[in-house]
Amino acid sequence: MSKKLIVITGASSGFGLELAKEFAAQNYPMLLIARRTENLHAFNFKNTLIKSVDVADYQAFQNAILEAETLYGKTDLLVNNAGVMLLGSLLDQNPDEWQTMLNVNVTGVLNGIQLVLKDMVATNTGTIVNVSSIAGKKTFGSHAAYCGTKFAVHALTETVRQEVALSNVRVLTVAPGAAETALLSHTTSQDIIDGYNEWKETMGGKSLDPKYIASSVRFMYELPQEVSIRELVISATRQDA
């Protein structure tokens, strides 16, 4: 197989699903990881392994990667896309929600990086793209814990990038703005959801289409290995925050 393995987490919806479609259209072999995988099977992607995995579970994540690499060869691109957004004020937010976000948004990213990085360093090639958020660069009301996890993604990405740059391995960040994904549905406060939707109206009622994240990641990946777009911030033009 001429094209190398692409691993995408959080692949069942939003950015992850669009990424799967984008790379499938280019005939890349893929490992698609999500907690709920039922809808992924309906797409009948070729040369694709689909696994139901919680990215915070290191052993399950590792097993999925090893199975895919047995089929398709070593991972050449990992997109750490799995994420949870549970918005709320620290005045009254359930601490369980903080832990959920830390588990998925931070531990899951660290797990993915470690599971593929040694082979990439050993072969002096490979790319890791961590999907963060504009909320990893600036703060928003009711986003304290979520922003904390996304600031962490920016920090760990840049640290690892520096550690492996001389091994010709790329570690990149994509920071999307508000987008048409299911992330907001995880939030339990109806007031926060209503306020978020009112904010979207200032953008013309629609935020960023996830397909542009997918095409941007493919562009970053398909540049020559010696070229590194370290960080891409992308949003709807009318997003003012």
Image (cartoon, rainbow, N blue to C red):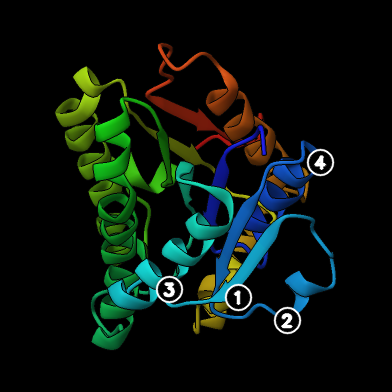
**Which residue type carries mark 3?**
Leu
Q: Is residue 69 left or right of residue 98?
A: right
Q: In this view, does 4 lie to the left or right of 90?
A: right
**Which residue type carries mark 4?**
Ala
In this rendering, the label closer to the viewer, 3 or 4 = 4
Q: What residue do we see at 76% from left, 40% from top?
A: 27
Q: Report helix, strand or loop for mark 3.
A: loop
Q: How far apart are marks 3 and 2 (CA)?
A: 23 Å
Depth check: 119 or 99 in front? 119
Position in image of residue 8 (x %, y %): 55, 54
Residue occupied by mark 1: 185
Residue occupied by mark 4: 25
Depth check: 209 or 72 in front? 72
Q: Distance between the residues labelled 3 and 1?
A: 9 Å
- Would you say residue 67 is visible in this rendering? yes
Q: Report the quarter where the N terminus lies.
A: top right
- Would you say residue 209 is visible in this rendering? no
Q: How far apart are marks 4 and 2 (CA)?
A: 20 Å
In this rendering, the label closer to the viewer, 1 or 4 = 4
Residues tagged 1 and 4 counted as in contact (Cβ below 8 A)? no
Residue occupied by mark 3: 86
Q: Residue 168 carries which label?
A: none
Position in image of residue 117 (x %, y %): 28, 44
From the viewer's perspective, is residue 168 above or below residue 44? Answer: above
Position in image of residue 115 (x %, y %): 30, 56
Residues tagged 3 and 2 counted as in contact (Cβ below 8 A)? no
Q: In which quarter of the image is residue 166?
A: top left
Residues tagged 3 and 1 counted as in contact (Cβ below 8 A)? no
